[in-house]
Image: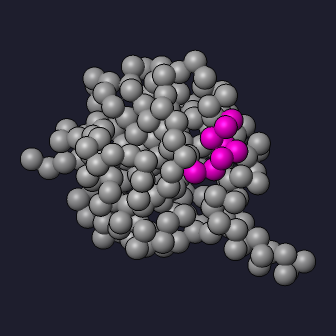
Amino acid sequence: MPRQKVMMKQLSSTDFYNLNSEQLFHQYQSLSFEQVHAAWLDYLPATPGRALDVGAGSGRDAGWLANNGWSVTAIEPSDKLLAKAIARHSESQIQWLSDTLPDLERLQESNSYHLILVSAVWMHLTPAQQTQSLQRLRRLQAPDGVIVITWRNLADEQERRFYPIEMKNFKNAQIYSTTDIGLRANVEWTTAVLRNTP
C-alpha cells in the first residue's frame, strides 16, 4: 500500500487531470466564477477585451468571460477536460487550444490580452518553468492588461506533483491570501495580480 502512494505522487499534473477528469469537471462547475475569483475581481477591466485563460479546466471561467462580452482564448493541456469543456460551453464564442506553459507554442507572439488568467496551475510548474512562464505571459500582456495567477499550498495533497513558488517573480504584484472555497482542510490559496507599470 505505501508503494502505491509513492507511485501516485509521481503522476504528472496532466495525467492526474486526465485520470480524474469526470470528478474534477463537476467539482469546478459546482463553484461560480465570482465565488472562486472574489479576491481579484476589482482588477477585472470594466470594458471587455481579449482574455486568455490558461489551464481552463472545465471552461467555467472562459464561459463566464465569453458570456460577459470577452473574446476568449482558453488553453487546457488535459485532453479529457478539454473535451468536456468544449462540450459544456459549445454555445460560447471561445477559441479552445491544447497547449502548455511555459512555451504556449500555439499562441503567436503578436497576440496581446487585456486579461490573462492562470488559475490553479502555477504550483504544477517547476521554479524555472514559473520564471519562463511569467516572461512568456508578460510578452502576451496588453499595455493596459492584467495578469492574474492563483495557486494553492500543498496541504495534504498525495497525488499531484507540487513545486515551491518562486516568489521573487511577484515582487511588483498585489498578493492576496484566501481560504479554500470548497472548505478543504488546511488548503489555502494565493492570488498574484500583475499590472503594467507606467
Q: Is residue 153 above or below residue 4?
A: above
Query: Number of labelled discs?
Result: 0
Q: Is residue 3 above or below residue 182?
A: below
Q: Position of residue 120 (x, y in %)?
A: 53, 52
Q: Quadrant of residue 129?
A: bottom left
Q: 141 left or right of 33?
A: left
Q: Position of residue 172 (x, y in %)?
A: 23, 59
The residue at the far right in this view is 1
Q: Is residue 100 above or below residue 40?
A: below
Q: Position of residue 148 (x, y in %)?
A: 37, 47
Determine if the magenta segment contains residue 194: no
Q: Position of residue 153 (x, y in %)?
A: 55, 64
Q: Could one spot residue 23 in this view of the protein?
A: yes
Q: What is the span of residues highlighted in magenta in the rendered image? A: 77-84
Q: Is residue 68 above or below residue 153?
A: above
Q: 66 left or right of 78?
A: left
